[in-house]
Each structure stands twice: as C-alpha cells, then as structure tokens.
Amino acid sequence: MELLGKTTIDFIGKRNISFVISAIISILGIIGIVQISRGAANMGIDFSGGTAMQLKFTKPLPIADARAALHKHGIAKAELQEIKDGNKLLIKIDRNTSVALGKAAEAVQGAFKKEFTDNVFTVDSSTEIGPSIGDKLRKDTLVAVIISLLGIILYIAWRFDFKFGIGATIATMHDCLAMIAVFYVMNKEINLLFITAVLTIAGYSLTDTVVVFDRIRENLHKNLKGAMHNIFNQSINEVLSRTIVTSFTVFLASASLFFFGGEVIHDFSLALLIGVLVGTYSSIFVASPIVVILENRALAKQGQKA
C-alpha cells in the first residue's frame, strides 16, 4: 500500500534534533533503571515479593468499601484494581505490609467475609511470591535483556555489517529505555508483564530496523552517487509507506488490547502502544543516523569523501 507515494524527506538531516530528544528519553530511562535496581520504583510483587489474588463477587463491590474493610482489619498497604466484567477485584499486597508473608490471602478473605456477609465471593486465583524469588526474577530479567542485546549485535553484524549492528543495538536499547522512562515517570507498576512487553517491542523494533537496513544495503550495493546521508534518506523514504502501514497495523492491535483487553493486561498493552511508536521512530531517527556517522568516519579514514 503506497499511502504516501514518493517522498523526499530529509530524515538524516534532522539527526541532531532527534539525538537531543533521544538523549533526554534515555537519561530518564537510566534513572528509572537505577531506581528499579534500588527497589525505589513502583515494583510489582513479581520483583518485590508479596501476594496477588483475584476475587469474584456475586454483586458489585466498590473499591472504596473494599479498601476500608481491609484497612479496618490491619491490611493498609493493598493495591486494589476493579475488573468490572464479572464483579471481580484484583488485590495486590507487597511483602512490606504488616500481615505475615503467607498469611495475606487468608487475612483478606477473612476481612471480606466479616464485612460483606451478603456479598459472597470466590477466589479465582491466589499467588504468593517470596522476596528471594523476587530478587532472583529481577536479576534474571536483567540478564535476559543483556543477552538479547548481544544477540542483536551478532545477528545484524553477521547479516549486514558491524556498523549496522551497533546502530541497531543502540536503537533497541533506546526503545527499552524509553519504555522504562515512560513507566517510571507515570509511576506504573514494573512487573513481568512489562518486561515481556519490553522484549516484545525489542523484537519488533529490530524487525522494522532490518527492513530499513535491507533497503540501505541494496542501494549501497548499487553504488548510487551522492553523499552517504542522501543514500540513507532515499532508502528510508522508499520504505516509509511500508513502515507506516506495518506500525499502524500493530498499533491498532495493541490499541484493541488496551481498550478492550481488560484491566489485567492494561499496562502491558500500554507498553506495547508506547513501544510501537518509539520503535518506529528509532528505526528512522536513531539507528540510521548512527550508521551514517560510522560510515562517514570509515570513509574519512580511507581518505574518501562521504
């Protein structure tokens, strides 16, 4: 689908602006990572340890009433999330609460049974995660992200060139940092679903970057005349319609999850929405300009004009 027709946008010429924007985003992402490693961010029980349970009531239960009942029975630090479809309530209690680890689920059920005798409930699910498991998951997650980035460098370096591998890796790191930055600034919960979304978007961003790089490689092999940034601009413009159509399709699917997928995967789908936009941006404004800079430096060393 040629939505835009032939375009001649100078993407590479705007690299200074895009680098400033990306630097700000990346700095926020690095701050977010530091805070996450310190446990100072809004960590989900997957990483901090605690109890998560989902209850289904026969009648709607306002969150304010549920929170008041828990507070009355000594459960003050509880995160409540209403799932309107089916009168369900998602309750998360971190390990720092006054309730002993392993007893939180029983305490919650006991509180609701005493306070809402006319509103019977059933337990759909209940999960307990200890602090040691949470710490291990956090470390394993970091290792998984590092391994995936190393894999990207090796794959792109093998398929294209080492300079392309560097550009793709920096762009992928940028995307991960951008998602972490947004979630940290919005004080969204960092859990395993979020990490899943980050790795998913890393894969999507890489795919989009490979498409752009593939056209660049084709044009470089044709020995097109002109400055290096002109060849890159031409290549990006040639695949621009394809990039927009693909990204828009994925964005629609993610938006459907966001609006109709339910509360449980709300943050996951939000991360996908952010990631699709950032991934498309980085393929054009981060990965490609970095490769142009590296190519021009290589040509300068060879005594050629870029």
Image (cartoon, helix red, strand yellow):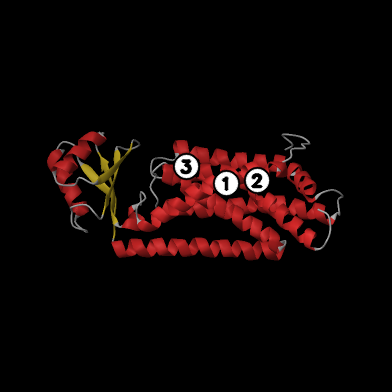
Q: Position of residue 270 (x, y in %)?
A: 47, 42
- Tell me which residue sits at (39%, 58%) in the image: 37
Residue receiving disc 1: 22
**244 and 231: which is toward the camera:** 231
Q: Position of residue 74 (x, y in %)?
A: 15, 47
Mark 3 touches mark 1? (CB < 8 Å): no
Q: Position of residue 110 (x, y in %)?
A: 15, 48
**Amino acid type shown at disc 1:** Ser
Q: In which quadrant of the rendered view does residue 89 lie?
A: top left
Above or below residue 23? Residue 151 is below
Mark 2 touches mark 3? (CB < 8 Å): no
**Amino acid type shown at disc 3:** Leu
Q: In which quadrant of the rendered view does residue 214 lie?
A: bottom right
Residue receiving disc 3: 270
Q: How far is mark 2 from mark 3, CA to CA?
A: 22 Å
Mark 1 touches mark 2? (CB < 8 Å): yes
Dot in front, 1 or 2: 1
Residue receiving disc 2: 285
Above or below residue 203? Residue 230 is above
Comes first in the chain, label 2 or label 3? 3
